[in-house]
Amino acid sequence: MVQDSGPAEKGRQPQGSLAAGLSGPPPANDGGAPKPGGAGLSGLRHRMPLATLLIQRLGLSALLLLAVSVVVFLGIEALPGDFAQTYLGQSATPQAVANIRAELGLDRPAVTRYFEWLGGVVQGDFGNSWASGNSVTEQIGLRLGNTLFLAFWAALVSVPLAVGLGMLAVHFRNRWPDRLINVVSLGAISLPEFFVGYILILFVAVQGGWVTFPSTVYADMPFGQRLEAIILPCATLVLVVLAHMMRMTRAAILNVMSSPYIETAELKGLDTLRIIARHAAPNAVAPIITVVALNLAYLVVGVVVVEVVFVYPGMGQYMVDAVTVRDMPVVQACGLIFAAVYILLNMSADILSILANPRLRHPR
Amino acid sequence: MKWRAIPLSAWIGLAGIAAALFCAIFAPLIAPYGEREVVGDIWLPIGGEFLLGTDNLGRDLLSRLIYGAQTTIFVALAATVLSFSLGVMLSFTAAVVGGWTDQGLSRLNDLMMSIPTLIFALIVLAVLPQELWILILVMAVLDSTRVFRLGRAVAVDITVMEFVEAARLRGEGRLWIIFREILPNTLSPLLAEFGLRFAFAVLFLSTLSFLGLGIQPPEADWGGIVKDNKDGIIFGIPAALIPGAAIAGLAICVNLVVDWLLNRTASLKGGRGDG
C-alpha cells in the first residue's frame, strides 16, 4: 500500500483544492478562525443543516461571481497600457486617440463604467465589439451553444469511460493492467491538447480521410452531420481529460478501499461484491463526483485550445481572436462566461458531495 | 542514496531532462544552422540534407527545435522559480502569522483560483504589452496560487508541531521560523511539486505560444513552432508534430522523475501523515 501513496497523493491534491476553493473558509485546516454569523444563523443551522449549507454555498458562489466580475473589469482597468493607443498603433495623433477614447467611453471614470457594464450583463447585454461594432451578446448566442454541444458530448463519453477504467485499475491493483493504465495515463497527462489534436487530424482526417478536417458547423446543420463534424475535437477532449479523471478516480477508490471499515467487512467474511456495493460505493461517490466535476470544469478550459486547433466556431476561438486584437468587451464577456461556468461546476460538485456524504453536513 | 534503487522509469526521465537541458544550454554550439536562417525550400521532408526537414519559411527545423528548447526551458524555469518563491513565501507567512493576514491571503487566493488559469491569462495578456518579462510574471503569478494552496496546507500542519512552538518560546523571529523550522521540513513535497509545476509551465507556455500570445516570432519556442507549421498538417506534412512531441517528451520525463520522488519520499517517511 505504501507504494500506492505517491500517485494517490498526487491525484488527490486538486480534489482537495477544489473543496477548499469553494467552501469559503475551509473547515479543516483553518486553525479555528471564528465564523461570522450570530445566534439566528446557528439556530437555523441546528434545525435545518442541509438547507442552510446549500444556501450558504449558493450565496458564496454568487459573491464569488460578483468578485470575479470586478476582477475581470477592474483588473483590465488597473493594468497599464492604453487601449486607444494600442488600437490605433504607435503613429496615431493625440487627437485621434482622444476621439477613440471618447467614442468608446473610456474617458469616463472606471466605477461608472463598471456599474453600467454590470447592469448590462445582468440584462444579458455585453455591449458592442470594438473591432466589428457588432453586438457581443448576439455572437455569444451563436457560439455558446456550439461550445456546450462539444463539451457535452466529450463529457458523455469520457466520464463513464474514466470511472470504468479507474475501477478496473483498482480491481487489478499492482498487476499488469493497473501498471499499463498507470503508465499510459501518466504519458497522456503530459500531452498538450494541440499535439493530440494535430495527430488525430494528420492520421484520421488527412491520411485516413475518414472525416473532414475543419470542423465547421453552421446554424441549421442537421444533427447527424453536426455530430460527425465534432468527432475529432470531441475525441481530443476525451483523450486529454480521460487520463486525469481516471487517475483521480483510482486514487479516490483506493483511498476508500484501504480504510479500516473495509478491512472489517473483509474480516467478517463478506464477499467482495457486497463489500463494494454496500460499504465502498456509498463512500466513494462523493470523491468521484468531485473528480468528475473538476474535470468537467477543465473541459471548459480545454475547449479553448481544441476549438482553435479544429477551427470550430465556439466561444474559445471567439475569445482568442478577441485577445489577439485587444477587443476588450468580447474578452470581458467571454472571460466572465467561462469563469461563471467554472464556478457553477465547482459549486455543483461541492453541493453534490455534501448531499452524497452526510458527514460533510456537520463541519467540525 | 543508492544508484541501484533508482527505477528505470526515473532514469529515462532524468536522461530526457538532461538531454533537453544540454540542448538548451549549448544551443548555439550544437545547432547546425542559425535560429532565423533560411536554408532551403519550405517544408522539406524529414531525412536528407536537413535531419528533421525545414519549416514553413524554409528554416532548418532541428536548429529551430534546439533554439526553441532554450527559450521554452528558460521561460518555464524562470516562471516556476518565481512562482515558487512567491507562493512559498506568502503561504508560509500566512501559516505562521495566521489571523487576518491568513484570512486575507487565503480568500484572495480562492478568488484567483476561481477563474481558470488559461482564461485569466488570456484576459490579462489582452491588456498587457507583449514582452518576455511580462509573460514570465503573468505565468508566475497565476501559478503561484497553486503553490500557495499546497504550501499553506503543508505549513499549517507543521506550525502546530512542538519544535516550532519551542522555537517561538525561544524567541526566534518569524523569518527564522519560516526558513529554519518550516522550510526544511516541507522540502520533499515542495520539490515534487516544483517538478509538477515546471512540467505544467512548459505546457502552459507552449499553449500560450500556440495561441499566438506567448513568445513572439521570429524567436523560436516549441509552442510557436507548432503554430508556424500547423497549416502543413492539411497537406500531410508532420512538421508541427515534431515540436509537439518535444513538449510532450519533456513533460513526460519530468512527470516520471516526480513520480519516483513522490514514491521515494512517501516510503521514506510515510508521506506527511496521509500517505
Image (tube, coloured by chain):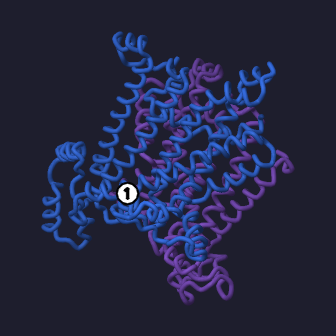
Chain colours: A blue, B purple
Residue A168 shown left or right of residue A72 in the figure: right
Q: Which amino acid does the dot numbered 1 rest on?
A: Met
Instruction: For residue B86, say whether it is visible.
Output: yes
* Position in image of residue A108 (x %, y %): 14, 50
For disc 1, the neighbor class at 10 Å (few under 14, some 14 to 19, many from 20) is: many
Would residue A343 appear left or right of A118 to someone viewing this image? Answer: right
Q: Quadrant of residue A89?
A: bottom left
Q: Position of residue B22 (x, y in %)?
A: 68, 66
At mark 1, the secondary structure is helix
Answer with the quarter of the image where residue B244 lies.
bottom right
| Residue marked by disc 1 | A315
Q: Residue B25, how many percent across, how many down?
A: 63, 67
Relative side of B273 to A44, left or right: right
Residue B96 shows in the view: no
Q: Front-most of A285 and A325?
A: A285
Q: Residue at x 78, y 56 (%)?
A: B11
Which quarter of the image is occupied by the C terminus of chain B? top right
Question: Residue at left 58%, top 29%?
Answer: B177
